[in-house]
Image (cartoon, helix red, strand yellow):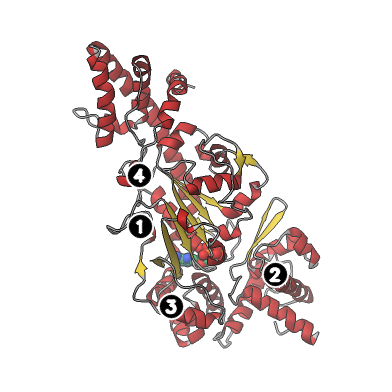
Amino acid sequence: MSECVMEEEERAESTVSSCVSMKSDWSKEDPLNFGIGPQGSPLKMDEDRAESTVPSCVSLKSDRSIECSSSPFRYGWLSETVCFHWRFLLSQGEKKRRTELQTADLNNSVSQGGELQEVIEGHKMSLKRRCEHVTEGTNEAGSGTLLKIYTELYITEGQSEEVDTQHEVRQLERTSKKNIQDTPIKCQDIFKVLSEQQRHIRVVLTNGVAGVGKTFSVQKFSLDWAEGLENQDISLVLPLSCRELNLIRDEQHSLLSLLHVFHPTLQKIRAEDLTVWKLLFIFDGLDESRFSLGFNKHQVISDVTQVSSVDVLLVNLIQGNLLPSALIWITSRPAAAHQIPPSCVDRITEVRGFTDSQKEEYFRRRFSDEDLSKRIISHIKASRSLHIMCLIPVFCWITAIVLEDMMTRDQRGELPKTLTDLYSHFLRVQIKRKKQKYGGKQRPEELTEADKELLLKLGRLAFEHLEKGNIMFYSEDLERCGLDVSEVSVYSGVCTEIFKRESVIFQKSVYCFVHLSVQEFLAAVYMFHLYTRKDTAL
Ligand SMILES: Nc1ncnc2c1ncn2[C@@H]1O[C@H](COP(=O)(O)OP(=O)(O)OP(=O)(O)O)[C@@H](O)[C@H]1O
């Protein structure tokens, strides 16, 4: 550790409490436009502390302060804070020391500001790597596609009426008709105050049905920030997947250690950094969380180093007890969104999916072969139910997988026009992919007895959990249906998305709740088999 840093840390110990306790409401009134600056407000201090504190606090105020030599402090609040200290010192007749302090301050700013900037740059690089490659549809994690397939989504402020239980094509057809009162909002603007009636937006809740693009939006938002394109007033964007948070459900953490676990590039950040930076925490997939968020009765935590259970940390963050100036973005399927009390939410948005022109744009982006994308688009337009379903991006992905396979093969066959057709072809394509990858000697097109048996077991799993409304399966559930955990993870693309982490298997059903789906389709295949006890028409 450099001498400078050690010195800084020692000084921090004596000054942090005052620095940390200075809560300003800058974020409420005046979103400041800088990268790593603190929220400053005048400190109360005595003369002795002033001498040792001023340089340290000033140095925390980012290396931007040295950008302009004639006026070292660019921002109004900063100059006010600093002037306060400086007037104080000058009144003590310490002109000589002023020069010394100024020099020391500039040196510290360079060293500490430089180090903080390095941490941020490291985090940006790591986030960029993570978000640039996305796991599309139900492909295995790791086989990432570049986020360049990202297509703008239709997102609105506020939310539509409750999801009904009609057949999903009907439901989607209705949803796709734009309501005149819908206020579209761009993903990158969700924290911006967009009208005079609005107040500061601290907590945003984004709803959206399964597969509509919530996670993709989080990835795009994070990537744009990491690439320096959008929301540069935020110092750190910190995505946390609720599914991954489940893995430490039984552990005790402080907010700081939690960040170290999920964002190892931030190992060097300290408690005081968290309190002075403008942070955005993103909790993606609240519906997958296995926490019970007790908003009414919980331990109050306001210190980022205080250890507690993860759900308590979450509640305190959302309520603003912990890091009151941090921005919070929560994404959820509608059925789970009620866990967040409306009083804690400043803005609700809803990802509604693709408009008709966005559907076409998706296929154009996905295929470099222009002729193929044109044929796919015209096939979809010719089939009413496929066209309506393509409102949901994950359905576009399924359609793209199936139609690409069928249109680029030599074999002739009628292209699927109904959802049942499409789902059965989807299963075939996924089985073929699995065989190509893990295959042995079998011909990829062939469906063996073992394949059929496995699909029926998956069907049973789908059916039983659909009845219970479960969206996550665990290894015991698989075993109960006679499924081998490792075998099923190979098949992950077939059933939906199955993640194997530690000993737990999470099945992220893209289609649960009210949606007809591959899961429902598998369940139906199983039911059909039970009914006829014959070979199913796979
Ligand atoms: N904006 C987009 N551009 C291109 N493809 C998209 C987009 N949004 C979603 N997709 C496709 O749909 C799939 C599902 O999207 P995503 O995982 O973001 O949905 P979700 O709303 O988070 O679903 P869930 O509630 O199941 O978690 C993606 O893997 C991708 O294939």
Q: Is mark 4 within 8 Å of ligand 1?
A: no
**Which marked residue is nearer to the observer: mark 1 or mark 2?**
2
Considering depth in this image, is 187 or 194 the residue closer to the camera? 194
Q: Tag on residue 27?
A: 4
Distance from the alpha carbon under mark 3 to that under mark 4: 36 Å
Query: Vertical placement of 186 versus 397: above or below?
Result: above
Considering depth in this image, is 298 or 201 the residue closer to the camera? 298
Other residues around mark 4 within 10 Å, as few (<14) / some (14–19) / many (≥20):
some
Q: Position of residue 405 (x, y in %)?
A: 56, 76
Distance from the alpha carbon under mark 1 to that under mark 2: 38 Å
Disc 3 marks which amino acid? Ser
**Which marked residue is nearer to the observer: mark 2 or mark 3?**
2
Q: Tag on residue 176?
A: 3
Can you name the residue that lies furthest to the left here?
Answer: 70
- Mark 2 or 3, nearer chain start: 3
Provide the secondary structure element on which disc 1 rests. helix
Rendered residue at 34%/22% (across/down): 54
Query: Vertical placement of 264 versus 367: above or below?
Result: above
Q: Position of residue 503 (x, y in %)?
A: 73, 52
Label 2, on which residue? 468
Disc 2 marks which amino acid? Lys
Provide the secondary structure element on which disc 2 rests. helix
